[in-house]
Structure formats: C-alpha cells, structure tokens
Image: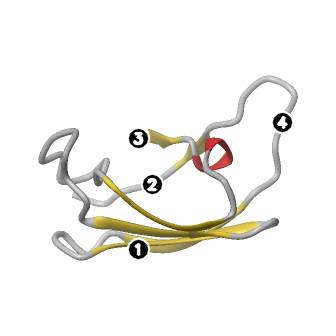
Amino acid sequence: MTFDFLALSAGNHRLPCPACKKGAHDTALGVSRGAATAVYHCFRCGLAGVQRLAPSRNSGSIELSVSE
C-alpha cells in the first residue's frame, strides 16, 4: 500500500484511510505532517505509525506496511 505523505502540507489533516478504504469522503485517518516526519492514526481500523520523510528523486510516495 502506498500513501503520499510528501504531497501534504505541514499541519494536521483528516483523510481517507488507505487500509480500511471507506471511500473518498472518509476522514478516519488523522495525519500530523511535520518537516521530517508524518504521524498517522486511523480512528476506525487502528492503522498507526510514524514515517520519516526522505523524498527520493523518483517518487514522493511512502510505502506503508499493513498487516491484515
């Protein structure tokens, strides 16, 4: 599963969760995006973590590992 944290501006965001996928208008995933990290937590399925943001030249996407 891929989620593009680098596309988000710094600050707090509510977004659709890429793990439980309830639709485009879903706001279950809370993301706090800083300059070097993104902290995320889904208030529905519990997906959570901290992702260090190190942009590569090829992609702005971060690969998330989700155990199902």
**Do the numbered discs 4 and 3 sit on residues whose CB atoms are within 8 Å?**
no
Q: Secondary structure at mark 4?
A: loop
Dot 2 or dot 1: first in sequence order is: 1
Looking at the image, residue 14 lies above or below residue 21: below
Q: Could you say which is closer to the camera, residue 68 or residue 63?
A: 63
Amino acid type of the residue tagged 4 in the rendering = Ser
Q: Would you name the residue on which mark 2 appears?
A: 65
Which residue type does callout 3 highlight? Met
Residue 59: image location, x then y, percent: 72, 28
Question: Can you identify the residue that label 3 sits on?
Answer: 1
The image position of residue 29, as x and y in percent, is 33, 64
Q: Which residue is mark 1?
A: 48
Separation of marks 2 and 3 at Cα, in angstroms: 7 Å
N-term mark: 2 or 3: 3
The reply to whether dot 2 and dot 3 touch (C-beta < 8 Å) is yes
Quadrant of image for the C terminus: bottom left
Residue drawn at (15%, 41%), measured in percent from left and top?
23
Is residue 2 shown left or right of residue 29? right
Image position of 59 (left or right of 51): right
